Amino acid sequence: MIEGGLEMSLIQLDGCGLEELIYDIGEGCLIFFYRNNCPVCEEMAPVLEELQPKYKGQFGFYYVNIDENKEVINCFKLDEIPQVLFFKDGEYQGKLSGEFNQAQVVEKIQENLVDLV
């Protein structure tokens, strides 16, 4: 852990990087929104990190620290942290909030990959 934040292998984004990724690049991806010193966030991060290598090159895994990027709370209407939002072709595809498990994440990814193949 770094200064109350998570240390992850996922790619970190800020508010500007989010819009470019979602709307310009349009790749299928998930974005994990977390807060420093959030016990549930710390539990959920490894779930995503374990899945990331399995989908390398097919589906992007990113994260945003909302303590450092407060503007994204309103932008993405985040009502609970942690929250994972799923996007494909620049469009919102769903979310997972609070505690989630690997099977739930895989199900959401598979729903998005079906249309990408």
Image (tube, grey):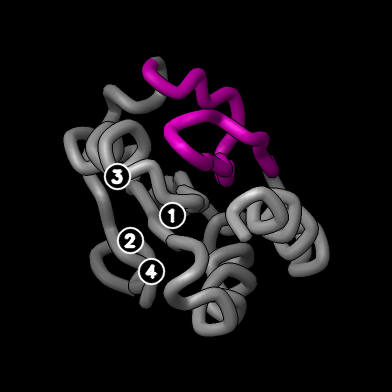
Marked residue nearer the N-terminal end (3 or 4): 4
The answer to whether residue 85 is magenta is yes
Q: Give the residue type that dot 1 points to.
A: Asn
Q: Which mark is residue 25?
A: 3
Residue 18 place in picture, x, y as percent: 29, 39
> Which residue, given by chain and number where applicable, does mark 1 sit on?
37
Q: CA distance from mark 4 to mark 1?
A: 18 Å
* Contact between labelled residues 2 and 4, with CB atoms less than 8 Å apart: no
Name the residue beneath numbered marker 4: 10
Q: Which mark is residue 4?
A: 2
**CB-based contact (under 8 Å), mark 3 and mark 2:** no
Label 4 or label 2, whichever comes before in sequence order: 2
Residue at the image position 63 percent from the left and 35 percent from the top: 93
Q: Nearer the viewer, residue 93 or 113?
A: 113
Q: CA distance from mark 3 to mark 1?
A: 31 Å
Which of the image's four quarters has the N terminus? bottom left
**Label 1 Cα neighbours within 10 Å, binned few <14 / some 14-19 / many ≥20:** few
In the picture as drawn, the residue positioned furthest to the left comes out as 16
SS at mark 3 in the image:
helix
Distance between mark 3 and mark 2 Cα atoms: 31 Å
- What amino acid type is highlighted by mark number 3? Ile
State which tag comes first along the sequence, 4 or 1.
4
Q: Is residue 89 magenta?
A: yes
Count of numbered marks: 4
* Residue extent of the magenta highlight: 75-97
Which type of secondary structure does the marked residue at label 1 adopt? loop
Instruction: Nearest to the eye among marks 3 and 1: give it.
Output: 3
* Label 4: which secondary element: loop
Quarter occupied by the C terminus = bottom right
Q: Is residue 6 visible?
A: yes
